[in-house]
Image (spheres, rainbow, N blue to C red):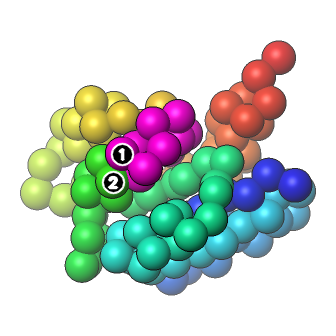
Amino acid sequence: MQHILVIDDEENIRFMMQEALVNAGYQVTITANGKEAERLYTRQTFDLVITDIFMPEKEGFEVMLELLSVNPDSKIIAITGGGIMTKETVLKMAEEFGAVHCLSKPFLISDLIKIIRNLLNPQ
């Protein structure tokens, strides 16, 4: 079973993604911040990581750089609701930091699952 790590400081987003991804057949680990995520991905392997960009303790950009230094082949989906910059600017930066796909909040969970399936099981 493919294992996905979801990192988001918004509890409702974390649990919504966890439920949907488990129902789609994935094993899912969730965490609320990048600091905890770092502890997780240095101890186990994930097939895919979904990270919010703006979080307390450690932001998604830092998470992406560290994860890619541990495993350069990591598949990362960056998500954001924006912040002090426009969503488009943030998502463009996420691609430059190594995200293979970026989504702007709010997004449809069906779109997320379709993206994950394409990344993990390319035809």
CB under 8 Å between discs 1 and 2: yes
Residue identifier under label 2: 66
Disc number for residue 69: 1
List x then y, in percent, for residue 54.
Answer: 27, 64
- Which amino acid lies under the numbered mark 2 shown in the image of this protein? Glu
Residue 108 drawn above or below residue 7:
above
Q: Tag 1, which secondary structure? A: helix
Query: Visible in this render: residue 10?
Result: no
Residue under the image location 64 percent in, 57 percent down: 45
Viewed as shown, does residue 58 lie left or right of 52?
Answer: left
Mark 2: few/some/many CA within 10 Å (<14, 14-19, 20+): some
Locate the C terminus and report the quarter of the image it occupies.
top right
Which image quarter: residue 46? Answer: bottom right
Q: Position of residue 66 (x, y in %)?
A: 33, 54
Q: Is residue 71 magenta?
A: yes
Q: Given the image, on which type of amino acid does mark 1 rest?
A: Ser
Disc 1 from disc 2: Cα separation: 5 Å
Q: Position of residue 72 (x, y in %)?
A: 45, 36
